[in-house]
Amino acid sequence: MNDWLSPEEWTAVRLSLIVATTAMLASLPLGLGVAFLLARGRFWGKSLLDAAVHLPLIMPPVVTGYLLLIGFGRRGPIGQFLYDYFGIVLSFRWTGAVLAAAVMGFPLMVRAIRLSIEAVDRKLEDAAGTLGASPAWVFLVVTLPLCLPGIVVGMILCFAKAMGEFGATITFVSNIPGETQTLPSAIYTFTQVPGGEAGATRLTLISIAISVAALFVSEWMARFVGRRIAVE
């Protein structure tokens, strides 16, 4: 691959994989918690929480990126706090690309996990509760194993969305080669320069290959986990 891709193109591929993987893993704990709240919780403001979670899906990605820039930029309230007290800078850094990708992929992860939790038979959870198990223990030993296929699907969907994210990322962290230039940004750059068709084509093929591989892995893992659950 190093012979086929230029160093700049390989850097964009590697950065995209790092950003997408980090965004997926960072979103998982919060995604599990929010999905469980939406699936089983009964509280005021549940509809508002549901709407807030899915807002990135219905808003233009550029708007999401602009809101991130306002909130997490160096002069934004959250961004300035993170910089002053922790020295963390997100805008125009690869870590900001992770945040943008996580925000865009989070709704897909939550929805997949929520549907999986809602499909779990409540009688099994009630039976564990009558045997003296605490709600947290019931979730860990009953609910969580049964909804593992949905968790896997949610993780892959989040990863795929993060890999293809463009609008929010380029608005929040720009398109800096070697720092924030992911695969979609690199493809866009190639389409804007004369003679860039070959580079755009190479990166497009790489992007398609990664997406197809993610789908195959998702299907395989979901079936594997499903068979393990059925056997147990």
Image (tube, rainbow, N blue to C red):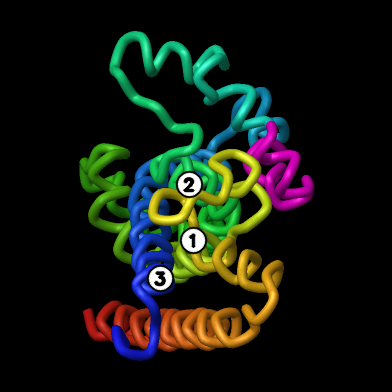
Which-is-in-front pick, marks 2 and 3?
Answer: 3
The residue segment tinted magenta is 50-66
> Which residue occupies the foreground of this view, 6 or 214?
6
> Which quarter of the figure has residue 204?
bottom right
Q: Name which residue type carries label 3.
A: Val
Is any part of residue 120 visible from this angle? Answer: no
In the shown orientation, is residue 25 left or right of residue 52?
Answer: left
The majority secondary structure of the magenta stretch comes to helix
User: Which residue is label 1 attached to?
Assistant: 182
First in residue order: circle 1 vs circle 2: 2
Distance between mark 3 and mark 1 Cα atoms: 7 Å
Which-is-in-front pick, marks 1 and 2?
Answer: 1
Q: Under tag 2, what secondary structure? A: helix
User: Which residue is label 3 attached to?
Assistant: 13
Is any part of residue 202 visible from this angle? Answer: yes
Task: Tell me, yes or no, whether the two marked residues, 1 and 2, touch with CB atoms within 8 Å.
Answer: yes
User: Which residue is label 2 attached to?
Assistant: 97
First in residue order: circle 3 vs circle 1: 3
Magenta-span inclusion, residue 52:
yes
Task: Tell me, yes or no, whether the two marked residues, 3 and 1, touch with CB atoms within 8 Å.
Answer: no
Say which quadrant the N terminus sits in.
bottom left
